[in-house]
Image (spheres, rainbow, N blue to C red):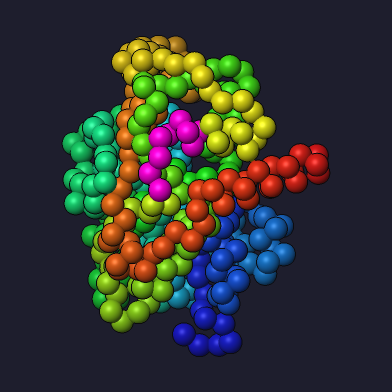
Amino acid sequence: MTGTTRGRVLVTGGTGFIGRAVVSRLVSQGWTVRSLSRRPDEALQRLGVECHCGGIADLAAVRRACADCDAVIHTAAKTGVWGSRKEFIETNLRGTENILTACRGSRVRALVHTSSPSVVCDGRPVEGQDESLPYPHSYLCHYSETKALAEQAVLAASGPDLPTVALRPHLVWGPGDPHLLPRLVARARTGRLRIVGDGRNRVDATYIDNAADAHLLALESLLNPARACAGKAYFIANDEPMPLWDLVNRLLAAAGLPPVRRRVPAGVAAAAGFLLESLHRAFAPHREPLMTRFVAQQLSMPHWFNLAAAKRDIGYRPVVSTEEGLRRLQAALRAGSKGD
């Protein structure tokens, strides 16, 4: 790489939760950063980020954004547990294929892909397993299916000219979270949040700064001649498995809300998910059900992972503990409420 900076990195989805954190970290470490997202962002522009507008399903836009970049960190995706399979395929699979095409057509020398642990979710508990977990034969939501297809395409493309890696950060949370916390808060405030199952299922979530760190560590590893992580996928989390509902209640407490006390059996939630999915497909396909089978599983089963591979190959260490992350979240929420 040449010039006074470390090189130019394109971040797809730079205005998203993980993407924005990755952009900020790259800028602070001296990289020249370009963002590709659907709309411009003044906050990124103030950081000196070159903002390109467009979707990853548009190959021409992706090619323009990739031009003259040394590396790409691909965080853009269609998220959620409900919606048209065609839309998930278009963004998550076709969009990722466009990223690969554009990387090959330019001088991109490394691709870090943001994947998801749900790509290996087969409906059974996960308690300390590693990346040897196989992809299941079927999925309960289009997001998991299409992220799995995209991850496989990225890893299969890895080679000397374009080393790639896929990261699987689990349940990312923290200040600025537009997904997990707002949904929990909304359901808690309307009295629709229930503990699913016995409440003892352990999970290992990921504080946002740790997720961003993992992306930069993976990038550095790919640009290192040894490239220990090339062609591989890695689970990323805080390395602090804890009961899911303890974490949920602590997140709610940070938002000034009381803990969840009411319960529903896991089997009842799964049955309700099946029924509601069927009804919504028939009568309201554009509205997300209050419960789905996938969500019932995620809320009632343990999901925590062996992080040894990420520690060994990219030097990952979760710097921000859950305790510290909760303090930061509470401070950010209080500061935000004072500014409203």
* Membership of 246 in magenta stretch: yes
Q: Residue at x 19, y 51 (%)?
A: 132
* Membership of 53 in magenta stretch: no
Camera sees residue 147: no
Q: In this picture, is 12 found above or below 274?
A: below
List x then y, in percent, for residue 315: 37, 69
Residue positioned most to the right: 339
Say which of 26 and 303 sits in front: 303
Q: Residue at x 63, y 38 (%)?
A: 254
List x then y, in percent, for residue 46: 72, 64
Left or right of 157? Residue 217 is: right
Left or right of 93? Residue 262 is: right
Camera sees residue 222: yes
Say which of 326 and 170 sits in front: 326
List x then y, in percent, for residue 153: 27, 55
Say which of 304 and 297 sits in front: 304
Q: Residue at x 51, y 33 (%)?
A: 248
Q: Residue at x 58, y 23 (%)?
A: 188
- State the extent of the magenta-drawn residues as a range: 240-248
Locate the C terminus by quadrant: top right
